[in-house]
Image (tube, grey):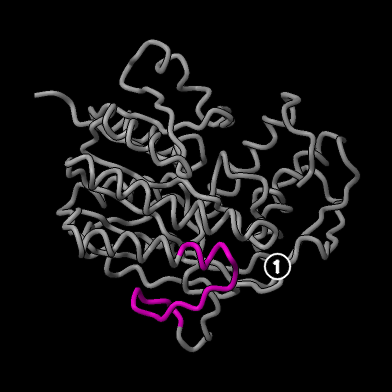
Amino acid sequence: MSEPRCLITGFTGMVGSHLADHLLAHTDWRIAGLLRWNDDLSNVEHLLPRINEGDRVELVYGDLNDYPSLQRAIAAVRPDYVFHLAAQSYPKTSFDAPLETLQTNILGTAALLEAIRQSGLRPVVHVCASSEVFGRVPRELLPIHEDRPFHPASPYAISKVGTDLVGRFYAEAYGLTVMTTRMFTHTGPRRGDVFAESTFAKQIALIEEGRIAPVLRTGNLDSLRTWSDVRDAVRAYHLLVTVNPTAGAYYNIGGTFSCTVGAMLEHLLSLSTRDDIEVVTDPDRLRPVDADLQVPDTAKFRAHTGWQPTIPFEQTMQDLLDYWRERVRSGRQFLVR
């Protein structure tokens, strides 16, 4: 019997690259990463020797906004599992590019699922929505249960509502085994520098190396988040598609440690070799509206899979900071975002 095959969209992102690492270490699956012609390969650079040698990893061209390319990718890979992680994933950017965000995330998801449906294949499909679909939740309604009404607070969040609903529609209407997740804040090495904790860690690393003045620029520090590690997240995604996958199911996934963005920044600063860093609020880093209370109820997913997060917040933040220190010292990161 041949090895199971999986397709990962968003392969070169933080989550996609860590998912590939996890599957290579814990399964015998063959992995195909969906790749656009201009994707940055830095997150999968360590996999390039395996890709070049055809050692269980391959790249296949495809773009969510190009339906024929998705058809060709599905036909070439013939996946048993699909992890749909690709998206315009930056909430702040979505205010500047709302139409691109809606197009890529909603219609792109519909295009992928339609290509799967038309192929006649019946893989197990994970559609990654976001905790941002819940938006502005009153404090008295925390923690957030799966059936809490959506109240999206950005074009990105609106697009993920569409992603969530499209995924469930294809399960209910066409019988595809599609499951949807609302992942709460997850981070770690390879996190994009447009996200708060990652840009903070990057700025600290640049300051430590004397690349920029000891001034750290922030946005909203009052937002409450529940933090989890990306390596715990991809372990959850693996369990999602292998432990009694249920068509149309939807789950919250998230960590157990909650604190404000400001408290997270204080922890990162405590890890720095510098004690003279000034924190300044940058108006350009503030969203017009913010989903400021993101605390999940994950009992449904835990009961279904037995998953538990294992990596503590402190390790995640240390690993994130060390990741940026290495990149800065190597001379690969100078732009501050």
Secondary structure under the numbered disc 1 in the rendered image: loop
Residue drawn 56% across the image and 62% down it:
156
Tell which of 105 and 81 is nearer to you.
Answer: 105
Q: Position of residue 160 (x, y in %)?
A: 46, 62
Q: Is residue 296 left or right of residue 40?
A: left
Tell which of 15 and 227 is nearer to you.
Answer: 15
**259 part of magenta stretch:** no
Q: What stretch is highlighted in magenta?
A: 142-160
Determine crowd level at label 1: few under 14, some 14-19, many 20+ residues with C-alpha closer than 10 A: some
* 96 to 62, vertically: above or below: below
Query: Dominant secondary structure of the magenta stretch?
Result: loop
Residue drawn 25% across the image and 55% down it:
178
On the image, numbered disc 1 is attached to which residue? 287
Q: In this view, does 169 lie to the left or right of 191?
A: left
The quarter holding residue 293 reads bottom right
* 81 to 59, vertically: above or below: below
Most extreme residue toward the front is: 68
* 179 to 336, vertically: above or below: below
Q: Position of residue 17 (x, y in %)?
A: 46, 35
Q: Position of residue 294 (x, y in %)?
A: 52, 71
* 242 to 305, vertically: above or below: above
Q: Where is residue 223 in the image (x, y as percent from the top left)?
A: 63, 71
Most extreme residue toward the left is: 1
Most extreme residue toward the top is: 53
